Image (tube, coloured by chain):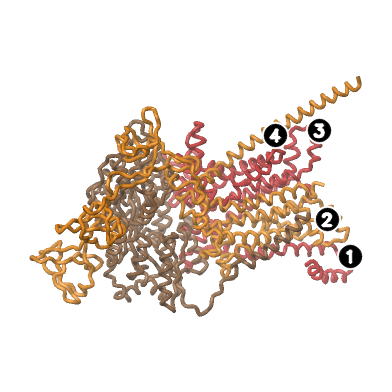
Amino acid sequence: MKRLLQFFQNGSNQRAYLQDEAYKFIGLGTLFMVLLGLAAVYLSPLLYMGSTALKSEAQLADPDDPLLPQSPQTYHYVSEETQTFRYTYRHPRTFEYEGRELAVYEVIAQGRILNYALLEDRGDSGVFIDPENPDAGPIEMANVTPSGLKAAVEREQLEVQLYFVDVNGVEQQLGLVDEFEDGSTLWVNPENVGAEPMRLPISKDDARLVRDERDLPLYHVPIDGETRELALLEAGRRSTTFIDPDNPDELIVVEERARGLDPVYKLELHPENFKTAIDTINYPRLFANTLIVAVVGGFGAMASATLVAYGFTRFNIPYGNLLFLILLSTIILPPQVTQIPTYIIFRKLGWIGTLLPLIVPFFFSNAYNVFLLRQYMMGIPLELDEAARVDGANPLRILWHVIIPTARPALVAVYLFHFLWAWNEFQQPLIYIGGNENNQVLAVGLQRFSQIYSSQQHLMMAAGVLTMFVPLLIFFLAQRIFMQGVVITGVEK
Amino acid sequence: MTKFKLFVPALIVLALVAVSLGPIAPVVKAQDDPVLVRIYVGLGTGYLPEQQAAQVALADEWNATHEDIKIEFEFHDNETARDELLTRVAAGDPPAIVGPAGVRSVYETSNLWADVSDLIERDAAELNLDDFDAASLNLYELGDKTIALPFGFYPSFVYVNETIFQEAEVELPPLEHGAWTWADLREKAMAVTQDSSGNFLGEEGFDPSAIEVYGYFPFYTNFRASVILFSPEDAGVQLNDDGSVTATFNQPAIQEAVQFYHDGIFTDTFIPNIDAENAISEGVTNPFVSGRVGMGVSHTWLFTGMLEAINSGAFTDQWNVYPSPTASNGVTTARVHADTFAIMDAFKDREAAWEVLKWLASGEPALTLATTYGAMPARLSLRSDWEETWLEAFPQLNLDVVYSALEYLDAPNHEGYMPNYARAWDALEQYWNNLRSNADMDVLADLDAVNAEVQALFDADLAGEATEFVPTEEKAAE
Amino acid sequence: MTTQIETAVTPELQTEAGRGRLALSPRRAQVLWGFLFITPWILGFLLFIFGPMLASLYLSMTNYNIERPGEMEFIGLDHYRRMFSVDVVGENESGAAELRSGYQEVFRVGPYHFTAQDHRFWKSIQVTLTFAMVSLPVNLSLSLLFALLTNTRVPGVTVFRTLFYLPSVIPTVVAAFVFQQFLRTQDGWLNMHVLNPLGLGNPAWLQDPGWAIPALTLIGTWGIGTAMLMFLAGLQNVPTELYEAARVDGAGWLSRLRHVTLPMISPVILYNLVIGLIGTFQYFVIAYSITIPAGRGGNDLSMYFYNLHVYREAYVFFDMGYASALAWFLLVLVMIITALVFRSSNRWVFYAAGGRS
């Protein structure tokens, strides 16, 4: 009976316990979901950043640019049409004057280019005719050396047909400029249109026409209640012409405008954006410089702030409160107040263009860090000091054996905060490093990059990810020391 | 605890290693160095990575043959170049030469530049002044000072995306200056404007909040550059015989201009607002190659970006340049920009800097720089070489339009002199930005207000109070 | 190192001893030690802060202009007088304000127009204070909320902490860049994928002057990671016995938060409040880079922060003298506000050590 009672009692206890656990579980579960939601909303701009960093340039240029890195698909099309290109044919200008064909030259006089026809070359002077106004008669110009003049050109725009032409056994793509009665032809090389066109002793029938080849964008096209993936050949106001990649010979004309259609996208990551970004901003150099500034400066900031905060919290310095207030007010000092004079000091020291102005001042402690450590040290019970003092320890010993171990998490925090601050600081390196690219740091390098590549969002975002990667890693690693330190600190005991 | 004790020494070691590795030793300079003429690039174009190599090569070329004067190009990002330059001047460490700098930079910081008029006179024969385009010579005269030699021009025209015109079945603009007006441009621009569902402006279902193709894109927008296209008299700044200056930014031509832009953005919706401009620029080297812009007025400097986009396959549309339209007062204006190099007044060795400047303005180096920057060289003898470069890149280019634009340049220039330049420019910009983002703005009333504000800035400057403030009360008491 | 300092101090102690044992007050030794410890700061202060400050105080009383260094003159307090030249004017019959020449309107209340000679100065103070009043409470409560939520035993809590901290390590320039795209009116992610589908409209975050402060506050929440960590450290410092005691007394979650947690972390709140306040007055990079075009303070000067005004006077208009005066006024203003916060902190900040320096 007693055992039975006990059993039931146990059972109800167990039930209560289980219920408690369930509530706890549900509570934590809800909290987890809340946190997940919060994080998603809070970090959505980061998703934008990450996604954009992996996009292709072509996708960014698309106004209907989808969320994820996807690329518009194309179809390589070889048409029946032949290929032409527009060519400006320039030939020497001539002018007919009194039955003679005169060459026209560019004569520069008094800040103007005059196109004059040369009538007579006299060595160091010349007689010219103005083709615009030949009735004015010959114009004599001294100080003009006709042999040094540039020929004026006549420009003629031609639509030139492209052919594969065999030139001395090498097949080239050339444009046909002119045909002559003797059967020879005049050709221009589209790769080198500045050169004189060349005359070849072949007829155009000996050459093969170049077909038009293009990458056409693919679209989802609804036809008769069915959506097909077609390549856009020509967009028009009334209709659009498509090609079916499976059946390229047939043109499909749709009474629909191209801009209203959805392009065909395929998931496509572009991790090479990161490499481009690294190469463009000289990442290793910037990285090394930033690391030096952050590591060395962080040490200086931590060490000096410890000493100063200790001095302020544990010693009755005359006017200590006033001094501390002065220290504090340096936090609120607008940088502009000291900028120009400080710059002059660093210049006198020969430090401009080096990393020193970004490091040395932090060995003289900084108000933020002192404030933080002071707040923390004031939380350390004085009894701990007293105990050590009774044991005969001097202030340095107390600092080393009592304060520093107790304030450990705060010290790490100071180091950490300085590191992160130095990593991201922009204005100081901008001014002090100046144009010395060898000593440039990441934040400024990145800003320069962002100015020049502002339309290349994908590169911009890739560079941003690269810059924040290190502080993030360091935070991730240091977080343990930081949090652990907070938990096992002496304050709690 | 042990972990922490390890942490501190580890930090110290790391710090020491970093210090010994780091390139942080101050640069030591020898006393008997040759004169170093530093050329500060960044106030205009020239600082872009792909432009730097050509300039460094020029410096090497000079340095190989000169012992007493060495030159060095330094590149600064355009956004911060001015601040850095001024900090340097304030700290007494000015560069020798600054450039390429536009007319605006020159006027805005007019007191920073050294007068070279005596040197130009002295070396006139060597410089061959006849060879400089006549239109360019007076651009850098500040009062009785001449601060630079002309270097290059950037004439402007209407860039037209012919593929978009073809798609919308709209006729292309005429090829002669004076043959079409801003009203014609508006009509064509509206006809090619299309939303993302394919509806053209004016058709049923057209959605003005989802426009994909804009008929007109305001490239390089600032107030003075935008309104000059409507051919105002005196470019809004009227210099009077008695030495006073009148702000005429509310004259009819400018009223017409601001109304055109505001209506174009908010009523006729063929011009993008600031936000949409940003969206169009995404993922492209310049907005024109986005394929979402029908027309836009821009300068020769766009050639460089176009070439890049075409070579990379990002831009496959047909395009060309067409003349600037004529304003309703019958005057056609093809806005022009001009770049130069100027010597800093604070630099000690003016003669050395002048030697370098002369060299930069002479044949070979001038052509190299002009090609690098996309400028039409001010030296006439270099024009045909320049022409060849671009014809090679764009065989279809309407070169006649490019050259005939030179007959319609804006004189006085839209970046020309105003008293109290920086503050007056800034007040106008404030107006311009409101105009492009505020649909409910009273455009003409605000134009009167900003004109009055600018007039007050002019008067203050000419009264000698540009920077030093004299309290009103005290002045009254005196 | 320890021995060195000891020998340095010994003679002093001996002199004290020579005068008589009573004079060897530990107080004097204390003072000496104290000064020794704060020496790094005193040196740094004189060299990098106090000296340059004096120099720029002098500049603020000159008409120093970088463009015309040769014309520098001492002009006394003229710059400060210019800042405070204000005038309240009424309207004429046609309803227009009767502005004095050289004065411009800052804001109006009914028929009264507040005008000033440097209207941008007053406008920038207005913008900065508004932003402080909106953004600081939001940031403080959000960072405390994040800290409270991640100070639990939720699975993956370390990951969450990292996630919430993550935006803080992003360089400000990059953050400005990300948000400039993220907040675009038509195709920004926020409007296109969140607000528009929910039927909440298309706010022109960065264009409409009315949305400027909300937009910047939103961006500002990305910088609360450090504050959150400070709170977290503070929370973990609260002795668990206190919670146990409160639980025994029957206090609920909210009551425990109010009577145990908040007082115990009040030093951290104070710290975060002061730092946040100062940060607002030095707010620059975002205000400078997020507007299009950059550095002009947005439409209708809706993002025209005080520091932007200082910057523009110095580096756009080269008026270093006036800029120095503006910087000095800012310094005084922030000092006053900080002093007020500290004074009030006597009432609400609780230190475990019981002592206040």
Residue C195 percent coordinates (x, y)? 51, 35
Q: Tell me the crowding category of disc 3: few under 14, some 14 to 19, or many 20 or more residues within 10 angstroms, Cα based.
A: few
Chain identity of mark 1: C
Q: Tag 4: residue type?
A: Leu
Foreground mark, 1 or 3, reads 3
Marks 4/1: CA distance? 64 Å
Residue drawn at x 53%, y 79% is B31
Look at the numbered disc 4 and give the secondary structure of its residue: helix
Marks 2/1: CA distance? 24 Å
Q: Are marks 1 and 3 on the same chain?
A: yes
Residue C336 percent coordinates (x, y)? 64, 51
Q: In the picture, which chain is orange?
A: A
Q: Tag 2: residue type?
A: Asp
Quadrant in which residue A260 is drawn: top left
Which residue is identified by label 4? Answer: A28
Which residue is identified by label 2? Answer: A385
Which residue is identified by label 3? Answer: C249
Q: Please give the label number shown on residue C22.
A: 1
Foreground mark, 4 or 1, reads 4
Name above or below for residue C167 compared with residue C34. above
Chain identity of mark 2: A
Asked whether the residues under the numbered discs 4 and 2 touch, taking CB atoms below 8 Å apart as contact, a structural biologist would say no
Chain identity of mark 4: A
Q: Tag 3: residue type?
A: Asp
Between C93 and B454, the one nearer to me in the picture: B454
Q: Are marks 4 and 3 on the same chain?
A: no
